[in-house]
């Protein structure tokens, strides 16, 4: 069993977000992405600096790879639970000869498992104001990076794929496409760290972005690509021999060092990857957010 440090604060139990890497056996990148997209609240605690913590009751609702990890590392798999509920339901109704259809039994099984596991991953109810906010933070980051002579840029591009607009985020240093982690770190920190945006100017002027208590160093140098030119570079990169499509933290395009190069909305990565590889998309210059 994986041991994870707990902090008791004001009668409540908290876990450090970084420590969830071992508990979930997933990367910190993947955990932060899940926390952000599932709107799981995090907080800071007096005496622990800017490190982020998640309360135990909220940890119980964090879903990674279709499973929710409870205290004492009890893991329940959604698909297995659904199969068990549906099977037991069919046996019970068959024995009692109630005449209930398989479809009705399956519907009830879904409802039961959803309630038991607090399975709430609903990606249709997106908060467009927050989406717009995060994009504005990227733009602020880019302006400050340019002002202080750093070549890191976060790109946010909207693509029309099968009639739906989906964003793709990626990171460049100089003229090169690189690991997308900085994009998700900035979005995550802005969402859950009230001080992040206010400190962004000072941090970048000192050559780094502070993600919780970790300094992510920026790269000095010039940058001359437009967003459109950077996107063309991205297409060239993901179609090159140095990249491959595989599932590590999730299905994505990875470079030769197994670092993901793009990030989009949760569970939409396969659509994004295949659209980029096949060219089945339209570049959207701007999206009106209401």
Image: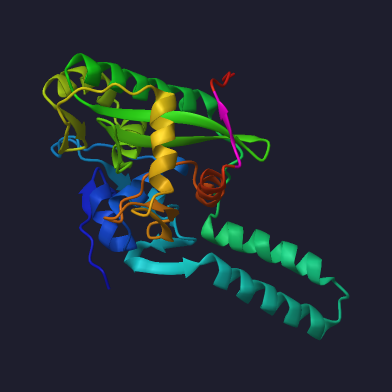
Main secondary structure found in the magenta portion: strand
Image coordinates of residue 78 in percent, x first then y, are 54, 65
Q: Is residue 187 above or below residue 110?
A: above
Q: Is residue 23 above or below residue 51?
A: below
Q: Residue at x 24, y 50 (%)?
A: 18
Lateral position of residue 283 relative to residue 262, left or right: right
Can you see residue 36? no
Quadrant of the rendered structure where residue 230 is?
top left
Residue 148 or 224: which is nearer the viewer?
224
Lateral position of residue 77 relative to residue 140, left or right: right
Residue 268 or 271: which is nearer the viewer?
271
Lateral position of residue 199 relative to residue 279, left or right: left
Q: Residue furthest bottom?
A: 95
* The N terminus lies in quadrant: bottom left
Quadrant of the rendered structure where residue 99 is?
bottom right
Q: Within the magenta stretch, is there residue 141?
A: no
Image coordinates of residue 211 in percent, x first then y, are 22, 36
Image coordinates of residue 5 in percent, x first then y, are 20, 58
Magenta highlight range: 280-284
Can you see residue 48? yes
* The C terminus lies in quadrant: top right
Q: Residue at x 45, y 52 (%)?
A: 61
Q: How is the image coloured?
A: rainbow
Q: Is residue 22 above or below residue 28?
A: below
Q: Residue at x 25, y 41 (%)?
A: 52
Q: Residue at x 17, y 17 (%)?
A: 148
Q: Within the magenta stretch, is there residue 283?
A: yes
Q: Residue furthest right?
A: 99
């Amino acid at each position: 069993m994986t041991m994870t440090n707990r902090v008791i604060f004001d009668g409540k139990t908290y876990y450090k977000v970084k420590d969830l890497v071992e508990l979930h056996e997933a990367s910190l990148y993947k955990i932060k992405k899940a926390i952000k997209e599932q709107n799981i609240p995090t907080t800071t605690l007096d005496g622990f600096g800017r490190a982020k913590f998640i309360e135990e009751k909220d940890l119980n609702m964090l879903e990674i790879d279709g499973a929710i990890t409870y205290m004492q590392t009890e893991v329940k798999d959604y698909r297995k639970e659904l199969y068990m509920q549906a099977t037991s339901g069919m046996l019970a109704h068959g024995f009692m000869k109630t005449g209930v259809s398989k479809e009705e039994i399956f519907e009830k099984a879904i409802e039961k498992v959803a309630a038991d596991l607090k399975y709430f991953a609903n990606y249709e109810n997106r908060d467009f104001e927050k989406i717009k906010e995060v994009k504005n933070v990227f733009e602020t980051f880019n302006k400050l990076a340019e002002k202080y002579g750093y070549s890191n840029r976060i790109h946010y591009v909207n693509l029309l794929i099968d009639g739906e607009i989906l964003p793709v985020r990626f990171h460049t240093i100089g003229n090169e496409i690189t690991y997308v982690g900085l994009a998700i770190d900035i979005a995550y920190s802005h969402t859950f760290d009230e001080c992040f945006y206010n400190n962004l100017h000072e941090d970048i002027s000192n050559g780094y972005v502070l993600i919780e208590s970790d300094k992510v160093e920026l790269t000095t140098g010039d940058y001359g690509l437009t967003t459109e030119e950077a996107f063309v570079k991205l297409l060239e990169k993901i179609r090159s021999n140095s990249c491959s499509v595989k599932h590590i933290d999730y299905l994505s395009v990875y470079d030769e060092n197994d670092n993901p190069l793009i990030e989009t909305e949760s569970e939409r990565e396969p659509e994004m990857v295949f659209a980029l590889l096949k060219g089945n998309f339209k570049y959207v210059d701007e999206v009106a957010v209401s």
